[in-house]
Image: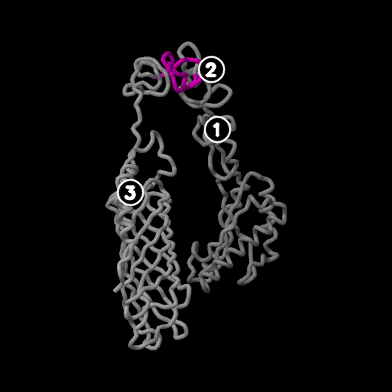
């Protein structure tokens, strides 16, 4: 087994010497106001640290990491990568205990790869005055080996270590850390002598158990705006005001009348009371000038535009204000009652004299007289609008008849447009066999059902 080295005594003596100073400095109250940046996040007592580390180990040429029963002593590649985890507890701000587990994938020269692992514990002595924390450490542990017999076999040996480092507390939780260590182990399997190894580690850790920072106590000013009304009773504690509520007298609507004397404090107004002139119906005509003050109206007198006879034609556009319009498709916009002229009446309903080729939408020449009479009637009475509907008998498929009736109605419309009738006065509809006016069981009835109808439009 390894002999104890003098460095153990050095660590213990140094810890006991610095303990009173470190505790006193760590317990010093923070300066007034915000704590100085360098003293923020400094170590505290009764805290824990959980961390990870990465680094490198430089092993001496002669070492005891081999099984003498299965493999010779061979040198390790220098340096070797190392990684691991650690956990520490600090009962005092300057002194703590830490456990580590390290893993080192290594290579023996020239035999091949192996896996070294370490379990170790140590004491940490640190200066807890600032967020940058120098420290010393020393401890003991075991280092084990796992490999094939022809490489180095399996082994586990005691190993001591001591070193120094520095931590930087980035914030209350997170810290960065750097360690440099001297490892002391046996040189050969007999463990009667020793050798040294070098280890450099960089890591990061989380600090748990810190006390929450105390909030600074603010001195409360009972009357911040110095108006004689205390904050608890002052509805405007940051603006000097008057009794009873401590708020200044305002002019909320900007009409030069202070709110205390303004009967309408949220609406701009005029003398004598700060209220706007009356407009009961809200039509922008003041009551003094509004002939209909209780009915929203328009210029020039504030009265609404009326429809005296209720025919939905307003009086200014109604030629017969006291007589409602007759909605019959003839001159329906003049507001007067009327009857459809006989010449127009003759061209409503079923129109006789319009013929088509069988199964087609082609108008036969024999229909010209009727068609031209329709054109003339529409020209003589330019206010009328007409729906042209096509109808068939029930012979054949309904879908075919619907399409045929639509095309025949459009053929009539196209003829009228070609003769100078405005397109917006004409509408078309294909009714197919759906609206018979005679019995489709007889040839005479079917002939009657094949027809064109005109209907006066009223809207």
Marks 2 and 3, how far apart at CA:
97 Å
Mark on residue 18? 3
Determine which quarter of the picture holds residue 319: top right
In the figure, 337 relative to 446: above or below? above
Which residue corresponds to mark 2?
A: 289
In the figure, 304 relative to 6: above or below? above
Give the magenta part as a residue range. Answer: 247-268
Does label 1 or label 2 sit earlier along the sequence?
Answer: 2
Q: Nearer the viewer, residue 434 or 285?
A: 285
Q: Label 2, secondary structure: give it.
A: helix
Mark on residue 430? none
Q: Is residue 248 magenta?
A: yes
Q: How is the image coloured?
A: one colour
Does label 2 or label 3 sit earlier along the sequence?
Answer: 3
Which residue corresponds to mark 1?
A: 314
Q: Nearer the viewer, residue 195 or 208?
A: 195
Q: Position of residue 338 (x, y in %)?
A: 56, 39
Marks 3 and 1, how far apart at CA:
104 Å
Marks 1 and 2, how far apart at CA:
23 Å
Q: Label 3, secondary structure: give it.
A: helix
Q: Position of residue 73 (x, y in %)?
A: 40, 83
Q: Is residue 419 magenta?
A: no
Locate residue 303 relative to residue 369 in the image: left or right: left
- How many C-alpha atoms fall within 10 Å of the one at disc 1: few (<14), some, or many (≥20)? some
Q: Residue, x 34% and y 26% (percent of image)?
A: 220
Does label 3 or label 1 sit earlier along the sequence?
Answer: 3
In the figure, 188 relative to 100: above or below? below
Q: Nearer the viewer, residue 141 or 8?
A: 8
Q: Nearer the viewer, residue 257 or 57?
A: 57
Q: Residue, x 38% and y 84% (percent of image)?
A: 152
């Amino acid at each position: 087994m390894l002999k104890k080295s003098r460095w153990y005594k050095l660590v213990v003596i140094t810890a006991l010497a610095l303990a009173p100073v470190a505790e006193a400095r760590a317990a010093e109250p923070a300066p007034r106001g915000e704590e100085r940046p360098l003293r923020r996040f400094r170590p505290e007592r009764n805290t824990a640290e959980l961390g990870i580390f990465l680094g490198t180990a430089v092993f001496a040429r002669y070492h005891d990491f081999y099984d003498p029963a299965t493999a010779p002593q061979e040198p390790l590649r220098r340096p070797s990568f190392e990684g691991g985890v650690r956990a520490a507890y600090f009962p005092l701000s300057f002194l703590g205990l830490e456990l580590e587990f390290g893993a080192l994938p290594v290579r023996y020269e020239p035999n091949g790869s192996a896996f070294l692992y370490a379990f170790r514990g140590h004491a940490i002595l640190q200066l807890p005055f600032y967020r940058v924390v120098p420290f010393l450490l020393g401890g003991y542990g075991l280092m084990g080996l796992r490999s094939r017999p022809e490489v180095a076999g399996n082994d586990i040996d005691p190993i001591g270590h001591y070193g120094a480092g520095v931590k930087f507390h980035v914030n209350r939780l997170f810290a960065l850390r750097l360690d440099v260590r001297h490892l002391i182990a046996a040189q050969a399997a007999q463990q009667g002598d020793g050798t040294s190894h070098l280890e450099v580690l960089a890591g990061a850790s989380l600090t748990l158990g810190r006390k929450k920072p105390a909030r600074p106590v603010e001195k409360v000013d009972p009357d911040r705006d110095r108006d004689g009304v205390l904050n608890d009773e002052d509805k405007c504690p940051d603006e000097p005001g008057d009794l009873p509520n401590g708020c200044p007298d305002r002019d909320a609507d900007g009409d030069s009348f202070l709110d205390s004397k303004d009967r309408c404090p949220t609406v701009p107004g005029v003398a004598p009371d700060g209220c706007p002139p009356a407009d009961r119906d809200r039509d922008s005509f003041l009551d003094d000038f509004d002939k209909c003050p209780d009915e929203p109206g328009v210029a020039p007198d504030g009265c609404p535009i009326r429809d005296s006879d209720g025919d939905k034609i307003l009086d200014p556009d109604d030629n017969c204000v006291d007589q409602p319009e007759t909605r019959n498709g003839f001159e329906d916009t003049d507001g007067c009652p009327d009857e459809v002229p006989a010449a127009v009446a003759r061209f409503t309903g079923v129109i006789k004299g319009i013929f088509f080729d069988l199964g087609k939408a082609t108008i036969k020449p024999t229909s010209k007289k009727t068609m031209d009479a329709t054109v003339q009637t529409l020209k003589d009475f330019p206010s009328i609008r007409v729906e042209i509907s096509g109808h068939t008998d029930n012979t054949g498929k309904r879908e075919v008849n619907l399409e045929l009736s639509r095309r025949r109605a459009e053929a009539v419309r196209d003829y009228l447009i070609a003769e100078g009738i405005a397109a917006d006065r004409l509408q078309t509809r294909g009714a197919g066999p759906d609206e018979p006016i005679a019995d489709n069981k007889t040839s005479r009835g079917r002939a009657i059902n094949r027809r064109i109808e005109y209907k006066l439009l009223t809207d």
